[in-house]
Image (cartoon, rainbow, N blue to C red):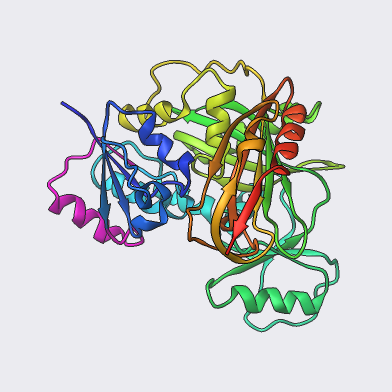
Amino acid sequence: MNTVTIVIETLTTGTGFNIFYQNMGQLFYLFTKKPGKYLEVRNKQIPDNVTVVEVDTTNEKTVYTKIKDLGLKPSAIFSLSDGFVEIACRVACNFGCVANDPELIALCRNKQASRDRLQKMGVKTPEHYLLPAKLTDTYKNYPYIVKPNSGTGSMGVLIAHDFAELKQCHACLKPQHSEILIEEFLLGPLISNEVFVSEGKVLDLGLTSRVLSDFPYFVEEGYSFPMDIGPNKDEVFQTSKQILEKLGYQHGPVHIEYILTAKGPVLVEINPRLAGGPIGNMLLYCLQENIYQSICQEYLTGKRATKFNLQAGHGMAVVSVFATEEGILAGLELNLAKKYPGVVKIEVLKVISDKLTLAHDYSGEVLRVYAIGKTSEEAYYRALAAKNAVKIQLK
C-alpha cells in the first residue's frame, strides 16, 4: 500500500519537482494555490505519482478541510517553499505527522525575532531595526539593506545608499509587507551552510558560495558548491549546529546564510527548509546521497534510514541568465552553450511567449547553466563562459 505524502507548495522550478521525480515509488499530492506557477504544470509534465490539488495554501483551516474532504490519510505533510513551511508544519501536527514545533518555524521565519533570540545566544548577526510607518532621517551608517521581515527568495531585498533611497525602498515594500527590516550592510562574501537534522542530530552537507548583484536589487547570479573557506569552515558549521540544537530543531533540511566579514562569519538568515534556487540540484550532483529521498524518509518516519556520505565528487556551479531587455520570449539558442567544457545541464525556467522583464529578483531568471569542475571555482568560470554563449530571442 502506497503512503500518502502531501507537499504544500514546492519550489517553482524543476528543483522543486525533484521531490517527486526522485521518489517515484510514492504517492504524492501537491497542494497549491496557483498550479500555473509551476513550469511542469504549464507544460503538462506532471509525474504519474503526483495529483495536483488547487486550494488556498495560505489558509491553514482551508488546507486541513481539503485533506478531510478528499478522504486522505496522510503519512507525511511538509513544504519545500519558505512561505508555506509554517502552515505545512501546523497542518502536519493536526494529523499527527512528523513535524517540528510550529512556533519554532514561525520564529525562524521572523527575521527580527530570530535574530534577537540568536543574539542572546551569543550568535553574531547584523544590527537591525524595524522601520516605522513614518520615516525620519535618523539613520547615519549608510548603505543599509532593506527587506521584508518575513520575505523569501531574495524578493524585495533592496539597498539604500542615502535617505532618499531609503524612502524609495520603504515606499516600494510597504504596500505588500506589514513589517520592513533595515540592517547594516556587511562587507564580505555571502555563503550558505546546508544542513540536515534527523532526530535532533545536525548533519553538515557543505557550504555554498553565492554571487549577487549590488544595485539597486540583490539578485542571485551564481552559486558554487562545495566551498572550502579555510579556518572559518568549521566555525560556520559549529555555529549552525549550536543554533539548531539550542532551538530544539528536530527534523529536515535547513538553509543558513552567513556573510564572511573581516571579524568572522555573521549569520544573516536561518531558513527551515531545503535551500531555494538550484542548490537542491547541486546537492544531487555533488553528494553521494539523494537529498529528496532523505527528506521524504525523515517526514515519513522521523529518522533517516542511512547516514549521509559527505564525500563530494567534484565542484559544481550554477549561473543564472536574465533578460537584458523586456519583451516576449520567442526562442532560445542553447546549442553552443551546451558544448562548453563541464556543462552538465541547462535548466530553462520560462516557456515561449512568456513576458520577460528586467531582473528585480530571482523571478526574472530565464535559465540556469550548471557546470562541474575539479573545484567549485573552476566550475563557476566554466558556467560563466557558457552563459555568455546563450542567445535570448525576443519579439
Question: How far across and down, in percent of the image, does residue 199 sit?
Answer: 43, 27
Q: Nearer the viewer, residue 163 or 264?
A: 163
Q: Is 46 located above or below residue 65 in the figure?
A: above
Does the image show residue 150? no
Question: How far across and down, in percent of the image, does residue 259 sit?
Answer: 75, 45
Residue at 53% of width from left, 35% of height from top? 280
State the quadrant of the N terminus: top left
Question: How far across and down, in percent of the image, does residue 369 sit?
Answer: 63, 39
Q: Is residue 50 left or right of residue 371?
A: left
- Residue 76 on the magenta segment: yes
Residue at 55% of width from left, 52% of height from top? 331
Total number of numbered labels? 0
Residue at 26% of width from left, 60% of height from top? 61
- Residue 30 on the magenta segment: no
Q: Is residue 124 left or right of residue 85?
A: right
Which residues, given as a range, are shown in magenta? 55-77
Residue at 26% of width from left, 35% of height from top? 49
Does the image show residue 311? yes
Q: Nearer the viewer, residue 206 or 37?
A: 37
Quarter where residue 50 is shown: top left
Q: Is residue 356 left or right of residue 225?
A: left
Question: How far across and down, in percent of the image, does residue 119 sit?
Answer: 68, 49
State the quadrant of the C terminus: bottom right
